[in-house]
Amino acid sequence: MVPIDARARGYPRGVGMASEGELVDIGKAAFVVVATALSVSWCGYRLDVGLAHPGPAAQPAETRTIAASAAASEAPKVRNNVSVAAAHLGVPPNADGDPACPPTLAWGRQPDGDGVMVTVLVDDATAVTVLVRTSTGVDVADRAILDRGDLRLFEFPRIDAAAVREVLIMTNTQRCFAVADPLTFK
């Protein structure tokens, strides 16, 4: 039986032991090592792409009891010639300290019947959650992922507009309460 090394030609027997005239294929070996390293590192880089991310840890939900009043069940008071843009400028923060939303985030009565519609126009790609709190104690939420410049109409057909106590809109960067669009209540 012939040893494996006896058939190999062109490889040095040790470091610095290659004699003149012997072929040294270090270039091929280096190429194979570099190609293997690149392919392994690329695969390692892409390994976690298909795996599901567990997401953030669950946070305990805050529960509050708020007594409903007769004023909470009425439609919002609307002044003459007021717009959503003007209405949100002088609005103080809500009880939780959330600011009023910009005019591109508003809510109102659905034009074709009962229910509530929340308008959301985003500048950047983001996840949006709309929470409608009612005076009856039934709160309803809807969530969507929007791209840059998307306009989304969140519809809540089973909620009476007169029963809405507050509409919260939460994105990746802000949490605010939506101001009612007075034009939808005429």
Image: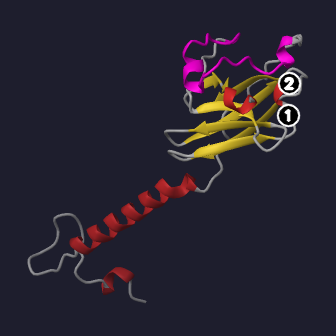
Tags 1 and 2 in contact by the CB under 8 Å rule? Answer: yes
Question: Dot 2, how many residues are within 10 Å of its Cα: few (below 14), some (14-19), or many (20+)?
Answer: many
Label 1: state its secondary structure: loop
Residue beneath the point at 8% across and 77% down: 20
Residue beneath the point at 24% across and 76% down: 11
Residue 41: percent from left, percent from top: 42, 57
Residue 24: percent from left, percent from top: 19, 75
Q: Does the magenta portion include 84?
A: yes
Dot 2 amino acid type: Ala
Q: Does the magenta portion include 9?
A: no
| Residue ID for mark 2 | 163
Of 15 and 48, nearer the camera is 48
Disc number placed over residue 169 in the picture, else none: none
Q: Is residue 112 left or right of residue 91?
A: right
Q: Is residue 48 left or right of residue 23?
A: right
Count of picture labels: 2
Label 2: state its secondary structure: helix
Q: Is residue 138 left or right of residue 46?
A: right
Residue beneath the point at 60% across and 22% down: 81
Region of the chain picked out in magenta, as a range: 71-96
Query: Looking at the figure, which quarter contains the C terminus?
Result: top right
Rendered view: 13 above or below 144: below
Q: Characterize the magenta stretch by its predominant secondary structure.
A: loop
Dot 1 amino acid type: Ile
| Residue ID for mark 1 | 159
